[in-house]
Image: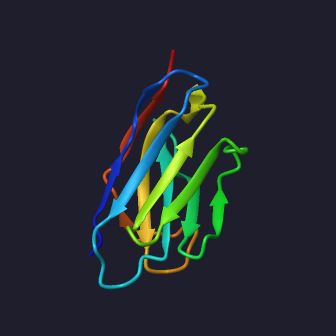
Amino acid sequence: QVQLVESGGGLVQPGGSLRLSCAASTSRFAINGMGWYRQAAGKQRELVAGVTSGGNSKYGDFVKGRFTISRDNAKNTATLQMNSLKPEDTGVYYCGASYEYTLSEYEFWGQGTQVTVSS
């Protein structure tokens, strides 16, 4: 079982930046896929970004170049740098991880971290 710990959420003004981090506990098997989903109040969970251990990445259509996901394979961490944040980016952000080389299908999940974009 892989445990994920997220950090970096908080309150930021529109146009500001936040960096989310996700650390996976030591795993017997390689964690090849990591990423972030988000869920706004009253809406379905949606993919924000995913990255594989090989460096492939995928982003939700709404990102439009504002966010960057990266990985440190040695430390089993994934980081989401979010710039030019908008009020509609508000929601709970969840880190996901998988043993598979996947950009969006995860079997392990973190508890979530709140991101609020408001003036």
Q: Is residue 40 visible?
A: no
Q: What scheme was used to colour the molecule?
A: rainbow
The residue closer to the viewer here, 114 or 55, is: 55
Q: Report the residue at 41% width, 51% height from top.
A: 21
The residue closer to the viewer here, 22 or 116, is: 22
Q: Report the residue at 28% width, 74% height from top.
A: 26
8 is higher (above) or lower (below) than 59: above
Q: Position of residue 58 (x, y in %)?
A: 65, 61
Q: Position of residue 30 (x, y in %)?
A: 41, 81
Q: Report the residue at 45% width, 29% height from top.
A: 116
What is the quadrant of the N terminus in the image? bottom left
Q: Position of residue 72 (x, y in %)?
A: 47, 65
11 is higher (above) or lower (below) than 75: above
13 is higher (above) or lower (below) than 57: above
Quarter holding residue 81? top right
Q: Report the residue at 44% width, 46% height from top.
A: 20
Quarter holding residue 50? bottom right
Q: Position of residue 70 (x, y in %)?
A: 55, 59
The residue closer to the viewer here, 74 or 92, is: 74
